[in-house]
Structure formats: C-alpha cells, structure tokens
Image (cartoon, helix red, strand yellow):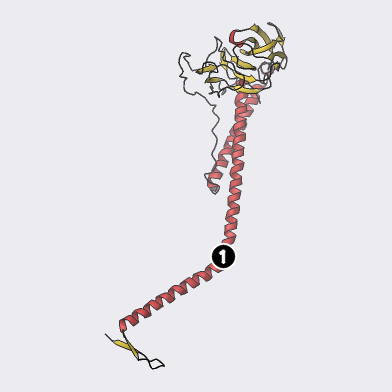
Amino acid sequence: MRRFTVIIVPNDVSAVRRFGIDSIWLRRAAIAGAVVALLMGGAAVDWIRLRRQAPELARLRVQAEEQRAALAAHAGAQHSLEGELARLHELERRVRVIANLPKASLEQARIARTPRLGVGGEQPEDATPPLGETFDPSTDAAPADAALQDDAPGPVSAAGSPGDASALLAAADALRDRARAFALDLEELADALVGRSERLAATPVQWPADGWLTSRFGYRVSPFTGRRDFHPGIDIAAEIGTPVLSPATGRVAFSGRRGGFGNAIVIDHGYGIRTTYGHLQTLRVHAGERIERGAVIATIGNTGLSTGPHLHYGVEASGKTVDPLDYIIE
C-alpha cells in the first residue's frame, strides 16, 4: 500500500509538521466528493425543473378546486331534487288515499312524539289499531313499528365525495329514471280522478282548525297513565273558542256529549268516510244536518278527558281508524 506524506512548513520558527496518508483514504475521499457533487447536481436540476413547472402546477391546482366546487354544487342540486321528488311522491300517496286508488297505504302507524300543550287520552270503544296489528292495552308493550311505505323507489344517495364525478352521473341517471316513472304515475292518477268530483268533495282534505299539532296518530305515551297506548287521531292545540271547520261535505251523524271526548261531533261524509271531533266548547250543528266543506261546526274547548284546550280529530275509512294526515293535502 502506497503512503503519502504531507509536510506543513510554517512561516515562523515553529517546527515542521508531517502527516502520513494512505492512498486508499485518498481514493475514498475522491469517491465521496464525486457522489456529493452528483447529488447536488441532481437536486439543482430538480429545483430548476420545479421552478419551470410551478405556473402549470398552480393552474392545475386552481382547475381542480373549480372542478371540486362544481361537483359540490351538482351534489347539492341533486339532493334538492331528491327532496322535491320525495315530497311529490308523498303528495301522490295522499291523493291516492283520498281517491281510494291502488298503491295507497292505509296501514301506516307512526310513533307519536310525547304530547305537549293540550292533548286527549280518550280511546273510543270502536277504535282499532292500523290494519294488520293487534294491541293488548293491559301491557306496556306495543308492537314493533309497522310503517308500510308505498312502492315509490327510495332516495338515491349522492356521490360519496364532491370529487366522485362518476357516482354523481350515476345518481343523476337514477333521478331521471325516477322522474319518468313518477310522470307515468301522475298521468295514471289524473286519469283515475276524472269523474270523481263528488267523492273528492266528500273527502276531508283540509285542516279542521288552526293550531299546533301536539299529538299524532298511532302509539304514544298516554298523558294520563304514562303507558303506551293507541291514539286514534291527531290533537290540534289552540285557544278556547277557535273555530272548527268541516273539512268536507257530509251529514252530521252525532252532536252531543260522548264520554272521554267531552262535547263531540261525528260527520258521515259518505263513501265509508267518517270524521270525529272531540273536546269541543260549543256545538254549532245538530244530528241530521247537511253541511258543506268549510262550514263552522263547533269551537275548540277543553271538555272531556283533556290536559288543555285542543281539538281531537279522527278519521275512519270503511270502519277502520286511519291517519288523518294521510288525507290532508298541505
């Protein structure tokens, strides 16, 4: 192995210094220097390339943000369309119920919210749960929810993320298919309604009074016993003396005192439809009287089994209690 000697001669009178270096270390130092030079050269080339590409990268970044915003806007518009389609399907379902047409579901039970303001605790002897259900009032257990939906297709979910363009396109195609199917349903519905004006006039399609909906149709916690029971109608809370209107033409079948309902009225609208009004303050009609839609039949009160001023409103169709909200077109 060759060895080199490095001699350092100072300018002053200090002693001369000698260092020995093996040739292998010189070779290693040269290789390390070359590697460092190559790395620095490559980094410099990359830095220059990135500097040249910076404007293009900035443009692509802006373009990506614009596309992301556009996809988000499309997703929002699609969600709005889904909501509107769902609302129209619900309206169509209610019209089918009113007109007694196919696809109308009368078997919908809703779990009511805990009642507020004025609600009633009555349950007439002829009240029945929704079709297909049984209920034992001696127990707290209520049957499982049996909310049967119409056969309209369910909502199409939006894309998993704003950037998922393919999912948005697929969802848009599904929405178009739903819209076409719904248009056909509406055409069928319009054809079926021709010549049914008398039945529609006798169908309770409007709210019987102004107020707040405090208890819905279906199973709820009784405001008197604290146990779950079946509520055969809806409760509308309002001030005493608020007018109660007939929601359809018909003939008064009953007007007077009726157990837990207090002062009550029953109207027979024909076509198997009857409406009941309970907890009334004053009665403005008599049994056998013929009335038109919108006529004032009573005022809201707090009579009978009641926690505050309100109207109990119930609907029967073919002898079965049904949800009044299925008939009301908002």
- The residue wearing badge 1 is 54
| Most foreground residue, 70 or 222 | 222
The percent coordinates of residue 322 (x first, y second) are 57, 18
Q: Residue at x 43, y 73 (%)?
A: 39
The percent coordinates of residue 136 (x first, y second) are 46, 14
The part of the image, by quadrant, that contains residue 330 is top right
Mark 1 residue element: helix
Q: Is residue 156 above or below residue 2?
A: above
157 vs 312, left or right, is left
Q: Residue at x 43, y 76 (%)?
A: 37
Q: Is residue 108 above or below residue 1?
A: above
The part of the image, by quadrant, that contains residue 202 is top right
Q: Residue at x 37, y 78 (%)?
A: 31
The percent coordinates of residue 310 (x first, y second) are 64, 17
| Most foreground residue, 27 or 117 | 117
Residue placed furthest toward the front: 13
The part of the image, by quadrant, that contains residue 314 is top right
The percent coordinates of residue 110 (x first, y second) are 54, 23
| Most foreground residue, 134 or 244 | 244
Q: Amino acid at mark 1?
A: Ala
